[in-house]
Every structure is written in C-alpha cells, then in structure tokens.
Image: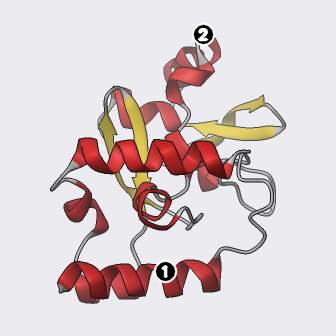
Amino acid sequence: MKKIALLTLVLVFAISCSGDSSDTKDPVFNAEGIALDGYDPVAYFEQGEARVGVESEQVEYEGLTYYFSSTKNRSLFLKNPEQYLPKYGGWCAYAVAESATKMEPDLTQWQIQDGELILFTSNIMTKLTGSLKDDWNEDPDGYMDRADTNWSSMNK
C-alpha cells in the first residue's frame, strides 16, 4: 500500500513540476545554464559526496557549464566527461523508472550504481512517505532495467 501511495504522490508531483518534456535528452540545469545546479559531478565518484563546485573551476561541455570543487576534479572531467555525467540526464531515476517522467532531483540524494551516477528527488511528499532512494534499493537492478527501458522510449 505504501508503494501505491508513494507512486501516486510521485506522479502528481512529477506532472505538476515536469514542465515541457519534449526534449528529454537535456540534462538538469538551472536558468543560467549551470549543469547540476553547480554541483561537482566528479565529486560523487572521487570524494564519495555531493559537493558544490566553484565558478573558478568550470568547464563548458555540450552547451552547459559544469562547476568543480577542485582543479583535480576539473581535470578528471576533461579527460572523460561522459564517465561523470549522471544517468537519465540527471533527472530522478525513480520517476523515470516508475512513470517515465522527468522530475527534478535533490542533488544530495544520489548513489553510484554499476559505475553510473543516479539521482533521486527529495521533497515534502517523500519526506512524508519515505525515501525514493530506499525504495529503489529494494530492487536496484529491477528499477534500473525499468528506467533504462523508459528512458529509451522517452528519447525517441
């Protein structure tokens, strides 16, 4: 019952927040074109934490600006940017898996799975019903398979 209620809340929230989903390939970025709202994509992998980057350590990649928390992380990104980009364009992996919907992530709710960064949302609804990340981890391979399938069809 908890999952049905949670999914219903996720769907309602996703529909209200998703905006135009006609180009689902676009990664999450803010109004200034800063990817991941300024969080360092390399820090998730190398430091094992969500770190906000600094403007002085930035890189433009595919039309977006990425910030890094150190010169080392910036250099690692430049060597292989695709290795550090979040899966599903940075949208909430759970929403992609369960409803083929783009939902803004909470950039502090994340994990590395199969060598890829996946992000989750966290909002008032998930605080009331439980963590989407916890639900995901009840069947991580199953959720990843569903998200991969949905993401493929979202990108057609």
Disc 2 marks a residue whose amino acid type is Lys
**Taking 99 as reference, is 11 above or below it?**
below
Q: Position of residue 15 (x, y in %)?
A: 61, 81
Residue drawn at (19%, 51%) of the image? 139
**Measured along the vertical axis of the image, is residue 8 above or below residue 84?**
below
Query: Which quadrant would the C terminus be assigned to in this image?
Result: top right
41 or 25, which lies in front?
25
Q: In the drawing, what numbered circle is on residue 11?
A: 1
Give residue 79's mark: 2
Give whichever of 84, 92 is nearer the camera: 92
Q: Is residue 92 above or below residue 85?
A: below
Mark in front: 1 vs 2: 1
- For the point 75% across and 40% down, which residue is it? 65
* SS of the residue under disc 1: helix
Question: In the image, what residue occupies the spot 38% across and 37% down?
Answer: 44
Give me the C-alpha separation between circle 1 and circle 2.
38 Å
Residue 80 point in image, percent of width and height: 58, 14
Residue 69 coordinates in the image, percent (x, y): 51, 36
Image position of 74 with respect to 129: above or below: above
Disc 1 marks a residue whose amino acid type is Leu
Residue 69 visible, this orientation: no
> What is the count of numbered marks?
2
List x then y, in percent, for residue 7: 36, 79
- The answer to whether residue 141 is seen in the rendering is yes
Q: Quadrant of residue 20?
A: bottom right
The one of 83 and 32 positioned closer to us in this rendering: 83
Q: Earlier in the sequence, mark 1 or mark 2?
A: 1
- At label 1, counting other C-alpha atoms closer than 10 Å, the crowd grade (few under 14, some 14-19, many 20 or more) is some
* Residue that sits furthest to the top in the current view: 79
- Dot 2 alpha-carbon crowd within 10 angstroms: few under 14, some 14 to 19, many 20 or more: few
